[in-house]
Amino acid sequence: MTGQRLRLPAVDYSEEAGYPVSDKISLVIEAPDLCPRYTARFVEGVSIAPSPWWMQRRLTAIGLRPINNVVDITNYVLHECGQPLHAFDYTDLAGQSIRVRRAQPGETITTLDGEEHELDEDSLLISDAERGVALAGIMGGENSEINPDTSLVLLESAMFNPSNIRRTSRRLGLSTDSSYRFERGVDWDMVDFASRRAISLILQLAGGNAAAGVVDEQCTSPRSHTITARFQRINDLIGVDIPREKTTAYLEGLGLTILEKDEEKLVLRPPTWRHDLEREADIIEEVARLYGLNHVPTVPVQAVWGGDQDMDNVLPLQRIRDAMLALGLDECVHVAPVSEQEIRDVFGSVEGCVKISNPLSREYEYLRPSAISSILKTVGLNIARNISTINIFEIARVFRTGTDGQYHEHYECAIAMTGARHPELYGEDARQQLDFFDLKGVIESLATALRVPTPICRRGDSPLASGIIDSEEWAEIWLDGACIGYIGRVQSRISRKMRATAPIFIAVIDLSPFISCQFPPVRYTPVSPYPPTSRDMAILAPESMEHATILQAIRESGVKHIESVSLFDIYRDPEVLGPDRKSMAYSVTYRAFDRTLTDEEVNALHEQLRNGLINKLQIQFR
């Protein structure tokens, strides 16, 4: 920006050891995809002592604790040049060799902080001929650290794969100054420069003689690419007419090399330390930053309506959201990526799940196939904060791989309820807990609010989310002959782990039928001014027969003037009713709109209903 050139520190030193570095160390990179470059230099006759005052003062000023001259030099050069370094006690390296390799599954290493870490095959390890001596790009090993008796030093300067360092650092919970820089990428040219700078300081402050040359293993060539930046495009995006000369000066000042230049464009090569410059938009961002965003005039945004292609989903989802909020539930929102373990805890395997190609961490490795694990996690967080009554829902996008190999995405609604049914009350009423039927009622109320048929809950073979839902208290949710979800109680072991004081109930509903429905207009029916008449009946049915089946048969019976049907008792007694039999007592209310029904009319209608149920369901009446 100022036009001044950066003055780099001196890195010249004499190589007086009389032999090359390759006589002292053999270097093999066994994982070239994780380590594109590794260099090693050697110094003998080093005297370990405290660093001089000026270096200790500078390290303390940036929050580092001085240790000894060699270690302090590596930390000093890291912050001076941006290149992490590591110094080994050469006498602790078995076989005079360095191997850059993947760790074996279950292999362990004790790092400089005294902690033992178990590694997997995704971890990159620096090892000698026998064992690991450093966790690549993160921290050195305790078994090869610089100590007061060290006299032979091997200095490492390398490049490592940023994504691999980030994953290993997150997995082990080990973040250092070195891992911070390797995660963001280091400069290819600075690898050798920083190594020479450190050797120069070691010879000045710790004495010794440096071996000649360097062992420099390169598995790839320095990255070199060009970017074409158009002057008109730069001005269009920034919204200011910046002169070509000023734009060129900005980019040259940032270290970009201009390969071609004409009236319309620049062809640029980014410097090796700018990994973030990939395309024209990155160049435009740099020009805008140097020009000054405060110099860009403020202009009202001209909104452009892009059509209603997204409204097919937005309006139905908003109706569903409004209905859930009206029922007293709170909405929560989670990110789509989840860990592999979360999916296995719910479904037992990751078969059919969508894996992210380059996840940020192991915690975000898959796109969630269901919202159940996310909403259950929120329940646990609330319970941990002493919130005992929880009624929440989420409308989420979920992802699956179909049998055709294509990715499929749809909307799902997950609901979780636990705690008191009436937390605002006192006494006996306040101790009533939410149960399965409260959540079932929410689903039925949602259907009523959306003006769709009431879903039917029926038992299936086994819970879909078998890792979470209790197999004794669950049901499938059916609508128009298709299973659209499930409802059930969370297993007791999970509730106990969360320290929940009441059972937790969860439901998951596929929203596709609700999104595609036409939401018919509401048709109001006048209330009959005539009194109702009720009749009771006790049905003797097999244990496997469900209330929903009987209710559906009554609706389809064709008997007139039925206003409502309610189940008020279920009785089981093998000695009286027989094995696998139960008695279900119903109250049926009859009412006409044009007159008061007589007892004879009601009895005839009730008898018609009984006969219809006998013929259709093969049941008996008590």
Image: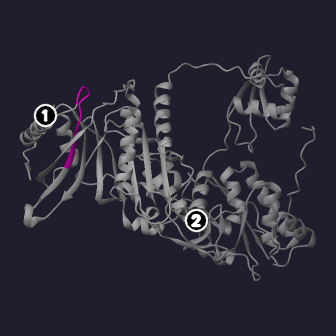
The one of 459 and 465 positioned closer to us in this rendering: 459
Is residue 590 part of the magenta span, yes or no?
Answer: yes
**Distance between the alpha carbons at the discs numbered 1 and 2:** 78 Å
Callouts 1 and 2 close, C-beta under 8 Å: no
Q: Mark 2 is on which residue type?
A: Leu
Query: Could you classify mark 1 by the number of other residues whose Cα lies within 10 Å: few (under 14), some (14-19), or many (20 or more)?
Result: few
* Quadrant in which residue 398 is drawn: top left
Asked whether, in this view, residue 180 is left or right of residue 131, the answer is: right
Residue under numbered circle 1: 601
Residue at left offset 37%, top offset 37%? 447
Residue under numbered circle 2: 172
Asked whether, in this view, residue 23 is left or right of residue 17, the answer is: left
Residue 191 coordinates in the image, percent (x, y): 73, 54
Is residue 360 part of the magenta span, yes or no?
Answer: no
The one of 481 and 202 positioned closer to us in this rendering: 481
Does 387 sit above or below residue 358? below
* Quadrant in which residue 597 is drawn: top left
The one of 56 and 103 positioned closer to us in this rendering: 56
Residue 430 coordinates in the image, percent (x, y): 47, 62
Q: Mark 1 is on which residue type?
A: Glu
Instruction: Name which of mark 1 and mark 2 comes first in the sequence.
Output: 2
Confirm whether residue 459 shows in the render. Answer: no
Confirm whether residue 544 shows in the render. Answer: yes
Residue 505 coordinates in the image, percent (x, y): 39, 56
Q: Which mark is residue 497?
A: none
* Quadrant in which residue 282 is drawn: top right
Foreground label between 1 and 2: 1
Name the element at disc 2: helix
Residue 389 coordinates in the image, percent (x, y): 50, 59
Display colour scheme:
one colour
Question: Which segment is the magenta one?
Answer: 586-595
